[in-house]
């Protein structure tokens, strides 16, 4: 990625204050410390360390730990020579103080949910993850276990997984739960695989080759279905923001394998007629799959079972407080009704005579989504979060999340140039996809540029999935974790930047000015040929070093041909 450092003097200037603050600040003394009661914007400036890759800090002979000496005599089960490395692993040689400084410097250049008000990462449900949960997830009884340990040696872990399955079954109304998926998208892929296995088991695998989804459902629904070779039919919204029901009725047929749908969709609009959509698909023999990544406003209020769904999934790193961890590892959960439970990946956990054990997967089960039994530390975090809150606490989570979102909606609509498309004057559930189109028409400033300017105040926001259906989008999701004062600060900062776009658009165009990185070469972020995802790739692409090509993965002959979508800028 190519970056350009800012030389603008505004990188070190404090934002302007107005009113009493500006009038009473003593000359030369700087501005008073920010507090929620003050109306001006918070002064912020990100550090810039220009930190090299950790491999570039390596010095031969340096070490951060002493590795135990090998045993004098290797056990009989030592690795065979054929699978041993010929050369040592090429890891950086660096001492502990340098490792600490390296990662602390990188952390100072990064915004995140524990540092800033992160309601701008809409659809991601950024919430507080209680730090006490890290004690459980980081316990040696958790991180010191191995996926292939005998069941009798991990009874505590198996009990947690079993009880977490029970909790999620109660929340969703499903009859059986699998915790094997390592992410939400992996869980959706598991559901798509179950759909395929179900129809194949009924002798309709070749006939039912179409999956229906909606444009405001998460893109992983269409992507996973396409990966499995399905033709994807996408429904667009009507004037109220609901997927067009008549278009669905026209699309379903004997070729329909399933409907994959999010409700509420990423607009934050809950579809009260969802059972009619489910019934339309069931009438032609298709299955219905509920993407519950947006479930934070539904806990204790609405369940997949009552809506008639056959399958569902949760993102535990969203609704159930497991941290996003910079994009991974995450945790997903698949829920199935009884007529589909035999297709869930295994092995499954069962309790016999007071002991937990692994039961062999059903012969109909789909292939494992990942090795092992899921991302155990994240499953423990979700379990502890649920147990700490209880049923009433989960309901309160959703009540506060919905309240916060609609409070933010009311304040956002006071900003000239902002609108919330569809469902005028209606409440939303847990998030809203807004449009800055009015402001863009007046000023030429885009939503992406407004988001970049927010970085100058220590904030962030996300626009939308591609393609943009809502023009100049902005997606906000104030979860239960944020106070009224924090929501006020975030929206007031957006309002100030929107006003700045009308009086000084060039500042917006050139932002961010006080962030760790000034501008980013968009072509580099969308061209895989420029990406270096490892030290080896970096040396090959940018240091002109050559290596013997490693063995490449060979796809199965029946895997559908990959189709790469056109390049699309994030902003």
Image (cartoon, rainbow, N blue to C red):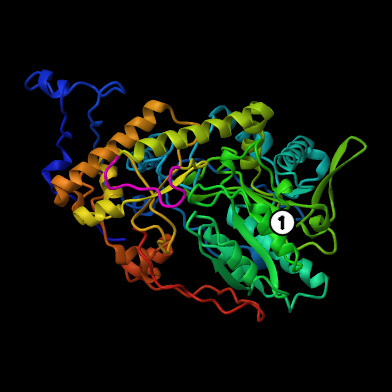
Q: Residue furthest bottom?
A: 557
Q: Quadrant of residue 260?
A: bottom right
Residue position marked by numbered label 1 in the rendering: 78
Which quadrant would the C terminus be assigned to in this image?
A: bottom left
Question: Does 140 sit above or below residue 267?
Answer: above
Question: Does 97 sit above or below residue 231?
Answer: above
Q: What are the residue bounds of the magenta stretch?
A: 415-425
- Residue 279 x %, y %: 72, 59
Q: Nearer the viewer, residue 248 or 206?
A: 248
Q: Is residue 167 left or right of residue 214?
A: right
Q: Quadrant of residue 320?
A: top right
Q: Secondary structure at mark 1?
A: loop
Query: Image point 23% across, 32% down: which residue?
Result: 43
Query: Image point 16% across, 50% down: which residue?
Result: 505
Q: Nearer the viewer, residue 334 or 68?
A: 334
Query: Image point 66% across, 27% down: which residue?
Result: 392
- Residue 512 x %, y %: 23, 48
């Amino acid at each position: 990625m190519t970056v350009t450092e800012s030389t603008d003097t505004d990188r070190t200037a404090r934002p302007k204050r107005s009113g009493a603050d500006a009038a009473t600040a003593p000359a030369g003394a700087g501005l008073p410390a920010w507090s929620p009661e003050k109306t001006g914007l918070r002064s912020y400036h990100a550090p810039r360390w220009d930190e090299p890759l950790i491999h570039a800090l390596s010095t031969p002979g340096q070490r951060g730990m002493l590795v135990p000496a090998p045993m004098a005599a290797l056990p009989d089960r030592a690795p065979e020579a054929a699978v041993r490395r010929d050369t040592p692993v090429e890891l950086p040689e660096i001492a502990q103080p340098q490792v600490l400084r390296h990662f602390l410097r990188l952390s100072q250049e990064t915004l995140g949910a524990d540092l800033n008000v992160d309601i701008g990462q809409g659809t991601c449900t950024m919430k507080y993850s209680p730090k006490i949960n890290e004690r459980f997830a980081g316990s040696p009884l958790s991180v010191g276990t191995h996926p292939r340990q005998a069941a009798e040696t991990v009874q505590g872990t198996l009990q947690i997984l079993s009880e977490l399955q029970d909790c999620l079954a109660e929340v969703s109304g499903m009859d059986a739960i699998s915790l094997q998926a390592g992410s939400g998208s992996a869980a959706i892929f598991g559901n798509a695989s179950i759909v395929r296995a179900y129809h194949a088991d009924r002798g309709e695998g070749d006939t039912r080759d179409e999956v229906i989804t909606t444009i405001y459902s998460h893109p992983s629904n269409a992507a996973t279905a396409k990966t499995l070779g399905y033709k994807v039919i996408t429904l667009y919204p009507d004037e109220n923001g609901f997927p067009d029901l008549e278009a669905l009725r026209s699309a379903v047929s004997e070729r329909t394998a399933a409907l994959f749908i999010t409700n509420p969709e990423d607009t934050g609009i809950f579809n009260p007629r969802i059972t009619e959509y489910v019934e339309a698909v069931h009438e032609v023999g298709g299955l219905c799959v509920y993407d519950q990544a947006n479930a934070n406003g539904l806990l204790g209020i609405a369940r997949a079972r009552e809506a008639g769904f056959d399958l569902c999934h949760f993102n535990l790193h969203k609704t159930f407080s497991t941290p996003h961890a910079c994009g991974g590892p995450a945790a997903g959960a698949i829920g199935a009704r009884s007529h589909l439970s035999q297709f869930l990946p295994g092995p499954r956990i069962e309790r016999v005579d007071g002991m937990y054990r692994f039961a062999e997967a059903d012969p109909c089960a789909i292939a494992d989504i990942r090795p092992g039994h899921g991302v155990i530390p994240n499953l423990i975090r979700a379990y502890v979060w649920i147990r700490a809150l209880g049923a009433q606490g989960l309901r309160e989570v959703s009540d506060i999340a919905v309240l916060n979102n609609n409070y933010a909606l009311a304040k956002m609509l006071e900003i000239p140039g902002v609108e919330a498309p569809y469902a005028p004057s209606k409440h939303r559930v847990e998030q809203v996809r807004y449009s800055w189109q009015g402001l863009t028409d007046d000023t030429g400033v885009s939503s992406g540029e407004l988001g970049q300017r927010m970085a100058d105040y220590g904030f962030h926001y996300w626009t939308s999935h591609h393609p943009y259906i809502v023009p100049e989008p902005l997606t906000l999701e104030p979860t239960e974790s944020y106070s009224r004062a924090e929501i006020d600060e975030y929206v007031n900062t957006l309002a100030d930047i929107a006003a700045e776009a009308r009086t000084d658009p060039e500042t917006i165009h050139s932002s961010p000015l006080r962030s760790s990185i000034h501008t980013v070469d968009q072509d580099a972020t969308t061209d895989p040929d420029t990406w270096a995802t490892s030290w080896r790739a970096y040396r090959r692409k940018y240091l002109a070093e050559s290596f013997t090509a490693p063995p490449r993965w060979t796809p199965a002959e029946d895997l559908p041909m990959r189709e790469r979508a056109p390049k699309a800028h994030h902003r």
